[in-house]
Amino acid sequence: MEEIKLYHKVWAMLPVLLVLLALTIVFIIPLSQGKGSLVWNWSLLLFSGSAFLFFLFLILRERLLHKPPLIITEDKVIDNNVGRIKEYHFTDIHHFDLIVYPGLYVSRAVIRIHYMPCVETKKMSEAKGMDRIYRKMNVAMMNAQDSIQVTNLTMKPKQLCDLLNERLKKKR
């Protein structure tokens, strides 16, 4: 089986980039004319400008450096988000299921990871500090310890969940 690399859709991130760029330009105008509170104008400019640069960095990092946020190999799933890399091995997982949280403009799709009972207990007991709080919160909110964010990827969430479950069956 080949390795599958999933990237974010650029067109889905483009409206966010354009809005942040427009806000940055709008916040530069009062600064150049000397109107309004200097502290307030600078804080708005820094917020919108840094958010714009952050989203631009995410897009360029994925595309130019070929670092996809999700990689599916023969025996594991690699969730490569900014700041953390998590590996989910198919041997530890019982099944995957998709949950979609409706939103005002965009729905958020998440694939829940249900571990084997012995692995689930082991992961909870080995978790320390914030990771333990994160896992308990996920169990309370989603009935699963881990999840993968799959909104705006190059594969549809339902197809991705089916693919993961198919690979899981082949691994057993």
Image: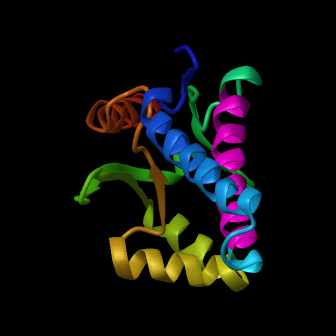
Left or right relative to 83: residue 150: left
Q: Is residue 123 magenta?
A: no
Q: Position of residue 32 (x, y in %)?
A: 75, 56
- 39 or 88: nearer the viewer: 39
Q: Position of residue 165 (x, y in %)?
A: 35, 37
Q: Residue at x 77, y 24 (%)?
A: 65
Q: Residue at x 40, y 44 (%)?
A: 151
Q: Residue at x 37, y 82 (%)?
A: 140
Picture quadrant where residue 60 is located: top right
Toward the top, the furthest residue is: 2
For the C terminus, the image quarter is top left
Q: Position of residue 82 (x, y in %)?
A: 70, 50
Q: Main secondary structure of the magenta part?
A: helix
Q: Is residue 12 above or below residue 33?
A: above
Left or right relative to 137: residue 88: right
Q: Position of residue 1 (x, y in %)?
A: 52, 15
Magenta-drawn segment: 41-62
- 18 or 28: nearer the viewer: 28
Q: Residue at x 41, y 28 (%)?
A: 170
Q: Is residue 55 magenta?
A: yes
Picture quadrant where residue 22 is located: top right
- 1 or 22: nearer the viewer: 22
Left or right relative to 152: residue 98: left
Picture quadrant where residue 139 is located: bottom left
Asked whether residue 81 is in view, the answer is no
Q: Is residue 114 above or below residue 53?
A: below
